[in-house]
Image: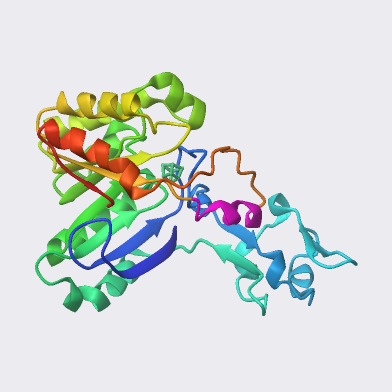
Amino acid sequence: MIFNIQRYSTHDGDGIRTLIFFKGCPLRCQWCSNPESQSFGHSILYDSKLCKNFGDCALAEPSAISTNPGGGIEIKRNLIAEPEKLKEVCATRALTISGETKSVDVLMAEVQKDLPFYREDGGVTLSGGEPLAQGKELVLLLQQLKKQGTNTNIETSLHVKWEQVERCIGLVNTFLVDLKHTDPRKFKQFTHGTSGLVLDNLEKLAYFGAHVVVRIPVIPGFNHTEREIMQMVDYVSTIKGLKEIHFLPYHTYGVEKYKMLGMDYIFNNNTQVLEEELLPYVQYAQSQGFKAKIGG
Ligand code: SF4
């Protein structure tokens, strides 16, 4: 299931790229800027500012949605049996449904529309959520992209079973790997995962000769200190074959979406990170022999 296709992107890999965002992520980081990507099923977003109380949603799903006499609606998301039925009911787009099941053929047809823009260095980037957590269709898609000669990147946190990574080696040009922390305690405190799994997978991926770019999201209150970033860079320098590190500044663009999804934003540090704050990190990584930059 995907939740977005973004065309003509100049981020997340070289050249002009088509970004395909898959739904579902086992990590559920506290600061995630795409909270609608975390659930593997449909997500229901409601923006009260756009709601005119027409009540069409309540008519379509009477057991789960009711209109409030004073304005707005009440949603019991767990009682919505067929979210897809709600896709077109809201005229003002106050209620929207994120998530669409698309076949490999349909995704390939979408990609083919953009082929003329890729030139020598562009291509497709699979993002999420966690693309590697998808089923066998992911491999079919990668096989088709490879057959077509399309450069393919995958953005991943590597928090999946090794078999889910291994099946993609040889089909992916570049793995863009998010390294969030090397401290197991911190990692566990701020995500729903364990750092050991990520580090093991990263080491194996490098061992098998995959092209990997390490990306460190710099998150205030989580890892944004010289000591922690240096520890991460030092760790990466112990892995043979890893040559490039990108530093991604934390932003708060996704915060509003939590409310729209009926989720709590429990990450309690909303300080934007300025790019200049990352310069010392870039310089340190360069001093350790890495190609390093700010941004994806
Ligand atoms: S790994 Fe990425 S998509 Fe998954 S929860 Fe964390 S920030 Fe969000």
What x and y, as percent, mark residue 61?
75, 65
Question: Looking at the figure, which quarter contains the N terminus?
Answer: bottom left
User: Is residue 49 toward the left or the right of residue 129 in the image?
Assistant: right
Residue located at (36% from left, 35% from top): 160
On the rendered structure, is 166 left or right of 53? left
Residue 282 shown in magenta: no
The x, y position of residue 44, in whole percent, is 62, 59
Of 217 and 168, the residue lying toward us: 217
Q: Is residue 177 visible?
A: no
Q: Residue at x 43, y 64 (%)?
A: 4
Residue 132, quarter of the rendered image: top left
Q: In the image, 46: left or right of 280?
A: right
* Foreground of the two, 131 or 264: 264
Provide residue 131's location: percent of width, then percent of height: 35, 49
Which of 245/170 is in front? 245
Q: Quadrant of residue 85?
A: bottom right
Specify start and end residues of the magenta stretch as a single range.
Answer: 252-261
Residue 272 visible in the shown view: yes
Residue 218 is situated, as x and y percent measured from the top left of the image, at 37, 39
